[in-house]
Amino acid sequence: MSILTETSLWFIPVCVLLGVAYAFFLYFRNHETDYDRRAQWVMAVLRGLSVSLIAFLLLTPMLKHSVKEVDKPMLVVAIDNSESMVSTSDSNYYRKSLQQDINKIINNFGDQYEVKTYLIGEKNELQDKGQVERLSFDAKTTNLSSIFEEISNLYANHNVGAMLLVSDGIFNTGNNPQYAAEKVKFPVYAVGTGDTTVQTDLLIADVLHNRQTYVGNYSPVEIKISATHLAGKKAKLTVYEGDEEIYTKPVDIRGNQHFETVKFTVEAKKKGMRKYRAELTELEGEITYKNNATSFFIEVIDQREKIAIVYHAPHPDVAAIRSALETSDKYDVEVFQAEEFNGNVNDYSLFVLHQLPSKTRAAGNLLNRINQAKISTLYVVGSQTDLSTLNQMNTGLSIQNISQGGRTMYNEAMPSVNESFLSFTFSEEARQMLKSYPPLTTFFANYQPAVSTSVFMYQKINNVVSNYPLITFYQGPTARVGVVAGTDLWRWRMQNYLKAQNFEAFDEIVNKMALYLSVKGDQGHFRVHAAELYSENSPVEISAEVYNESQELVNTPDVRFVLTDSEGKEFASQFSKQNNAYSLNLGKLPVGDYTWTATATEGSATYTKSGHFSVQEILLESMNLVANHDLMRTIANRTNGRYFSVSQLSQVEKAIRDNENIRPVVTYHKKYNPLLDSWIYLLAIVLLLGVEWFMRKWGGGY
């Protein structure tokens, strides 16, 4: 420990001299009271010390000392909570005893380790108290790679000692976990559960079909059938549309490992989301009948929506947007340079204008035609955009450029989703992928959204979420308008591929934006936005809007919602009010078909909307029930950990304790405290003055 001051230490003698001088003049120049000679010297010393100590505080002294910190090793316990864990013959142990056995291990570690416990499923669920609170084995999908990615990101600066991974090694979403495990810097102690024996089973392994088709078309469907240890048995495949049987085929199982693909077509007779169900005969001896049937959906539409992408100059954004839109059968996409477009704007449902109007291509004639035809528009704003002209286009967003010395300035802005955005929803996978997207190039400017503008994403600049919009939507007087306030969207698509080896998240976001803009808007006073298909592992989210007679958004009236399931049971609820709109989260609903009715009363008018949707069953966990212990061994070996069978679970604790590399990390760092904060120093001054005061009173002084 040492003492530092903000000023030179040569001032310390000055403080001492000040104390001596004060004591001298007080006790040796003042003869009003006669003190005992020894008492006089003692009081002078006490007064001199106290004044010197007080004067020393004027130098702002600091106490410098070293602080020892012990970072306990962190033990991450990750348990597979998916349905496949209990879909085998030894499921009783996992349902009744696994949670107790794992908690016993956690308790035995005591306070020597910092334990973080996660349940793995569609997402990783952190247990609040460190122990396993509830193993339900109800997750519909398994993403094993995500646990390694999450731990690496969250605890990059922590002393992660080891991971205890309990799983059957079956994964059906995300990347291959062995590659994700190679990047971690801690050993993984893998416990293989489940049965590696190929069980007797007949199942629908996969269904391949078009997601969309047109009325009157015959859409191809491929159903992949797998059978194990059922040689010589006969089954039947039946396909239903609603209650109507539309296709049937006998299945002759040849050999213990039988696989075949059944191809047929379905006729798209009616517009809308059409539900189909494929069923296989249930044979005696199967380990489960859950995978003998599955449902699939095909959206039937009247015709393709035409989208025109018109650009100022060639740019990789144009190709990225086009590629994303062409993944959907809903759209017929055409690309033009500004002066090349000479078509009829009424033929298109949406115009994507890349850096138009520009400084050299105002495209005024085209913009006027689009506006007069009341066609929705998506503006992509870049360095060539003429902001003064754009601000006159009634886009719902004004961008006033800020220049320095006549030079245009730009920002690098990453996307940040506005959690209050209600116009449409997108998947959690896309939401997570957005967090890794690189920045777009945006103007350093003042952004002024209109009151009724909906902000989809904000600009995140230098890891700070600003109030500058990045993507907005606006219901104009003639059509819907979207603005992407930056370029280099192509980087998002490339990052998507680097991260997940596909473009699905980027394509989903672009298609959701296009669908919202291109759909023929409901111009009524009451509008309800609900999808026709939801997954059973996703919440059912519905939004609504109420407009007054001036077509202004209001949310003063209450909006009532009644949901009816396939058995006729009704469930009433009410929309929550958010900003100028309404939202309703029904949570995760059981698989089935539902109808709904929404009612709002504005003034003397009552508005009613109705519709229907289906909740689709997810059967990924029942498609493969053969445990992959080789994967678990590989993960353990590549991280310098160890593999255990579930019967060896009790040995994991000793293996972790015996690893000499899993130890507390001791660090020392310097700490500075003002001497003024020291109660000992202040107590010393008080004691010196107190003793002196007592002696003065005792000697007859004042």
Image (cartoon, helix red, strand yellow):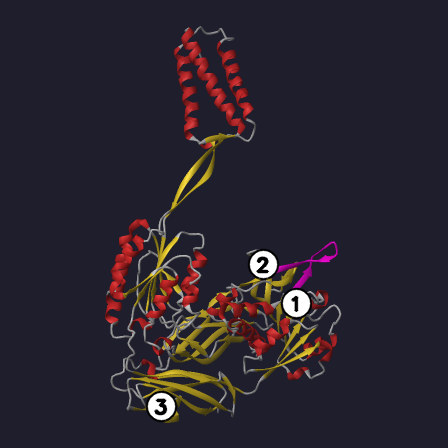
- Separation of residues labelled 2 and 1 (CA atoms): 18 Å
| Label 2, residues with CA under 10 Å away: few <14, some 14-19, many ≥20 | few
Residue that mark 1 sits on: 381
Instruction: Please give the range of residues in magenta.
Output: 397-413
Q: Where is residue 279 in the image (x, y as percent from the top left)?
A: 35, 87
Q: What residue type is labelled 2?
A: Asn
What residue sits right under mark 2 in the picture? 467
- At 53% from the left and 18% from the top, the residue drawn is 18
Point out residue 380 in the picture as x, y percentages from the top left corner. 64, 69
Of mark 2 and mark 1, the one earlier in the sequence is 1
Nearest the eye: 226 or 80: 226
Amino acid at dot 1: Val
> What secondary structure characterizes most of the magenta part?
strand
Q: Is residue 484 visible?
A: yes
Q: What residue type is labelled 3?
A: Leu
**How far across and down, in percent of the image, does residue 23 sit?**
49, 14
The spot of residue 6 in percent (x, y) is: 55, 31
- Along the line of sight, the residue nearer the viewer: 607 or 255: 255
Residue 580 against residue 333 in the figure, above or below = above
Q: Report, in whole angstroms, how far the alpha carbon at label 2 lies from the one at label 3.
A: 56 Å
Residue at screen point 31% across, 58% down: 131
Q: Is mark 2 on a helix, strand or loop?
A: strand
Task: Please tell me in which quadrant of the rendered image residue 360 appears.
Answer: bottom right
Query: N-terminal of the two: label 2 or label 3?
Result: 3
Residues at badges 2 and 3 in contact (C-beta under 8 Å)? no
- Callout 3 secondary element: strand
